[in-house]
Image (cartoon, rainbow, N blue to C red):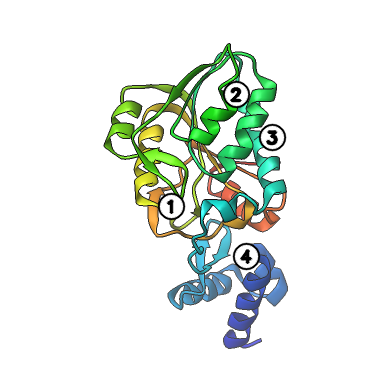
Amino acid sequence: MFANERYAKIAELLERNASITVAELMELFAVSIETVRRDLAHLEKQKVLTRVHGGAVSIKKSKAFTKLEARANENVELKRQLTESAVRFINEGDIIAIDSGSTAMELAPIIKNRFERLSIATNSPEVFGCFSDMEQYELIQIGGKYHREEKAFCGHMALDAINRLHFAKVFIFPSAISLKNGASEFVHELFEIQRAYMQNADEVFLLADSTKFETTAKIKLCDLSPSLKLITDNRLPDRIYESYKRSALQIIRN
């Protein structure tokens, strides 16, 4: 098989599977590891893929921004799956912070049904409202400028409040995640809030359903590192899951 034929086949595989391993390509094409690496390097230069440890992942187009009202009705079952996984990392009596967004609104009632005593800070009135009748919860509403479309508080007053607090755990809901570009967000005001939460927490959990993986939003939140815990649902393809594991990232798939 000529090189151009291999390039076309690799691109086709990535379109279908989102990721591929070096070992799979060696077996498929009956070629050496050096040949596969040269092919992947060439395709990376052509912006077809991004090389990762042990293989490559597809370069997808930037994720489209949708408003909160629309997102609240998207991928609901996937969000429930990953939020069920997330609550396993919470202990009775923990001090936690919860970001805003549609996944936050799925996480809140699950927490409420599992724990009797927590300290919770959030910039989301929707999340706060879910917990407002829990007498044993210590609640902190992070206030400030209200972002109506995202139903969240932001701005300098919100940042000042967060920077006066410290959390054992924080749950962040980025718009997109990729090995190459890290976690990213669309709304600048909320990006600043997320960064503040992360800087003031012992443990950071990034919750994203499988449709957000290997996509990119316009504002970079952070690089992916082994100190972060990534939580997703069971529809994340095995190849993508394994590529994150090979990159020494903590990824939890329900």
Residue type for callout 4? Ala
Q: Of helix, strand and loop, which one carries label 1?
A: strand
Asked if residue 234 is positioned above or below residue 1 in the image, the reply reads: above
Residue 131, position as x, y percentages in the image: 58, 24
Labelled pair 3, 1 in contact (Cβ < 8 Å): no
Labelled pair 2, 3 in contact (Cβ < 8 Å): no
Residue carrying label 1: 185
Query: What distance separates the C-alpha of mark 2 from that of mark 4?
Result: 32 Å
Residue type for callout 2? Ile
Residue 203, position as x, y percentages in the image: 48, 29
Q: Earlier in the sequence, mark 3 or mark 1?
A: 3
Residue type for callout 3? Glu
Query: What distance separates the C-alpha of mark 4 from that of mark 3?
Result: 26 Å
Q: Earlier in the sequence, mark 1 or mark 4?
A: 4
Residue type for callout 1? Glu
Q: Residues within 10 Å of mark 2 (few under 14, many from 20)?
A: some
The mark found on residue 18 in the picture is 4
Q: Earlier in the sequence, mark 2 or mark 3?
A: 3
Q: Residues within 10 Å of mark 3 (few under 14, many from 20)?
A: some
Q: Nearer the viewer, residue 74 or 18?
A: 74
The mark found on residue 84 in the picture is 3
